[in-house]
Amino acid sequence: MARKDVYSLCGMCTVRCPIMVEVEDGAVRFIQGNPKDAGMRGALCPRGAAGYALTQDSERPQYPMIREGARGEGKWRRVAWDEAFAHVAEKLKAIMTEHGPQSVLWSDRGGPFVDLHQAFMRGIGSPNYCNHDASCARNVQHAALSVSGSGRKDFIYDYKNAKHIVLQTRNIFEAINVKEVNGVLDSLDNGGVLSVIDVRATVSASKAQNFFMIRPGTDYAFNLAVLNELIATKQYNAAYVDRHVNNFDALKKFVEPYTPEWAEGETGVAASALRKFVKQLVQAAPAVIWHPGWMVARYSDSFYVSRTAYLINALLGSIGAKGGLAVTNTPKDVGRKGLKKFVDLFEKPAIPRADGAGSVLKHIDAGPGLVHKAYEAMVSGQPYPVKAYIIHRHDPLMAMPDPDAIRQAWDTLDLIVATTFTWSDSAWYADVILPMSPYLERDSIIAGGSGLKPTIFYRARAIEPRYDTKADWEIICGLAKALGVEKLAFDSLEALHEYQLQDTGVTRADFEKSGQVALCDKPVYKDMAEFKFKTPSGKLEIINEKWEGMGLPSLKPYESPARPEGEDAFRIAFGRCALHTQGHTVNNSLLSQKMSENTLWLNTARAKALGVNDGDTVRIQGGNGKKVEGTIKAYVTDFIHPEAAFMIHGFGHKLPPESRAFNKGVADQEFMIGGLKKEDAAGGGLSLQEHFVKVSKM
Ligand SMILES: Nc1nc2c(c(=O)[nH]1)N[C@H]1C(S)=C(S)[C@@H](COP(=O)(O)OP(=O)(O)OC[C@H]3O[C@@H](n4cnc5c(=O)[nH]c(N)nc54)[C@H](O)[C@@H]3O)O[C@H]1N2
Ligand SMILES: Nc1nc2c(c(=O)[nH]1)N[C@H]1C(S)=C(S)[C@@H](COP(=O)(O)OP(=O)(O)OC[C@H]3O[C@@H](n4cnc5c(=O)[nH]c(N)nc54)[C@H](O)[C@@H]3O)O[C@H]1N2
Ligand code: SF4
Ligand SMILES: [Mo]
């Protein structure tokens, strides 16, 4: 019997943990976290463990398809890959001839492999590469840029060495990144303190010494009071502030009115508890991580919540510290050369982006832009027509608010292409489906290259594709070839890897031992005495001129969020659970057995007033004037704030091929009518929790 271990990367969520796959006679016997990776130590999360069920699933797109009926009708014609590539190329060429290459939009899920996607877009001459992040971490990204001049990933959460970890809007034990979970557990084992600020008690809260159940949408008040207390009592790290913070006096003056007593009226957290908490932070500083958030596309002030989180870290001296938000190293920082990029094969298109990022919206990162603004361009035709859309590993109809408004925008398009490995609402609405092989069946370009210990890695194919599906690189290079973008028409993985590795001193054989190659021996911490941030002052900026120039204050006065009006009204809140990934695992045969539908978390006293008991089926209504309804089981608990109605995102699928997920649970995004227009203008993130629903007993 032929048995082998394949070092690869998990693909059940966006984290892409290193794994080791045991393969016997072409079948997967076992998947575990890569035991040779010090951060993984063999561990996997439940979704990673259920990965083989994805490969075995026959309820996924199995071959390329071209739409026959109307959009969304579900009538498809099976085609061969050559025909699919030729069809897409012919349509794209016609659209680009008529409207210019800028009329083509791409969106994807971001992550380590996007170099090839961006290169493809450059290759055809369009600036309109977007990722999903307007509905995820854009507010954090811009908060990081506005404070430090660097993006959020230029800082590493050094959990393992932290003495106090604060999770604000971050549920690390259920919204999982395995290495991060291991790091937090190490910190706790070493006597570290965990504090959780959330609207409900999560698994993370159950492991915390401090749990603050905050009124939804008042985190900015909480953070302003923490800054106030640190400054008023002179507990902040004055030497660090002196060396690394610009315009500190402006902050000092701004936070004066925001006392812990004032915040108590907003957040519901006692002033005395906040003061005690601040003392604990100071004791642990600088080995403190106040997490600036991950999924914070939630409120119209989420950018400011995240920004103040960075400022609290700064006042504790933890930005750049061991056990804090350590500064990432690039290969150059450790004396090495990094991967050669595919985008460098092409000139950057000179034309501005359709979403305005980097041009009209000077403060918005022009790398991935803001995809919902590109949808606006579809409708208005301004600044120019957008006529074709390639949706790669992205399900905007599930991941963005107000699906009907999105469909209307897409109805203006001449071509929608979806590359995906499961059915999704967006793929179902597409004109062409280019099915990808699930991760165990596909390989990838090399990625990585920065970190405390910069490391490069790639996804190796563990088994052969079960159906007529392809890897990302095969699809992108195939399309490039059909379009005549010769420089990107690589025809083998070896050729792609050799291009990438040419300057690095690393060969393909070096990956055989553990699936990854570290570019230095051990984690390297920057010497902060010498360090300059990438801002005009070289320091962390309390006042950012770019944002000020756009009329967006760096220090925004607090505005109290609306309270739900009426006995039956609640603010929508949502999040993740350990058993599912976004909207794409609910039809997985193993995971759907463990959790087949979502529930609606309601506070006990509020539920009682509505006559709702735990386990009752309730009607949920909303839609900002438009009628949207659903039925869902209530989970009645003391451990959620009375103003919030919480559900796990990703359920409520209604696609015929998905027998296990069909009509199970409720989709939160459907209640967010008008949501494409609600955003934090300073951070670019959508404000997905600025919506209310009504709940009644059935
Ligand atoms: N199992 C699993 N893990 C995942 C994913 C997945 O789908 N499944 N997805 C990955 C991705 S893409 C991301 S972005 C991350 C997301 O990681 P997180 O951002 O940590 O995940 P969420 O569950 O969305 O949100 C965290 C918490 O915010 C709380 N919350 C809601 N409103 C408020 C509020 O007003 N104030 C405060 N303080 N808290 C509030 C929610 O109750 C929730 O517990 O997870 C990643 N890991
Ligand atoms: N209302 C509401 N909206 C949300 C959220 C929420 O909690 N509530 N969460 C937000 C967050 S944090 C995020 S990150 C986004 C996530 O939004 P998306 O990235 O759109 O979500 P996913 O379900 O992870 O993946 C989308 C599609 O990509 C396909 N796919 C997954 N992996 C691969 C792959 O490796 N290759 C290919 N080709 N396809 C793949 C899946 O089959 C799925 O159809 O949604 C955001 N939107
Ligand atoms: S967190 Fe879980 S699902 Fe995500 S990549 Fe890691 S093991 Fe896979
Ligand atoms: Mo996300």
Image: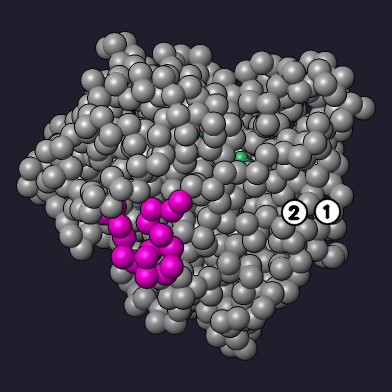
176 shown above or below 348: above
Residue 199 lies left or right of residue 74; in this view the side is left
Q: Under tag 2, what secondary structure?
A: loop
Crowd rating for badge 1 (residues with CA inside 10 Å; few <14, some 14–19, many 20+): few
Q: Residue furthest bottom?
A: 98
Q: Nearer the viewer, mark 1 or mark 2?
A: 1
Q: Amino acid at mark 1?
A: Gly
Crowd rating for badge 2 (residues with CA inside 10 Å; few <14, some 14–19, many 20+): many
Q: Which mark is residue 487?
A: none
**Residue 578 appears anywhere in the view:** no
The colour scheme of the drawn protein is one colour
Residue at the image point whose x is 67% and y is 55% from the top? 675
Residue 329 lies left or right of residue 57; in this view the side is left
Asked if residue 640 is among those painted magenta in the image, a careful observer would answer no
Image spot of residue 311 (x, y percent): 31, 43
- Would you name the residue on which mark 2 appears? 673
Image spot of residue 310 (x, y percent): 33, 42
Task: Give yes or no for contact between labels 1 and 2 (Cβ–Cβ under 8 Å).
Answer: yes
Looking at marks 1 and 2 on the same chain, the residue that comes earlier in the sequence is marked by 1
Which image quadrant for residue 576? top right
72 shown above or below 649: below
Residue at the image point whose x is 73% and y is 42% from the top? 692
**Residue 69 appears anywhere in the view:** yes
Q: Residue furthest left?
A: 530
- Would you name the residue on which mark 1 appears? 625
Q: CA distance from mark 1 to mark 2?
A: 8 Å
Q: Under tag 1, what secondary structure?
A: loop
In the image, 388 versus 609, the foreground residue is 609
Q: Amino acid at mark 2?
A: Ile
| Residue range highlighted in magenta | 541-557
Residue at the image point whose x is 46% and y is 59% from the top? 682
Image spot of residue 275 (x, y percent): 36, 23
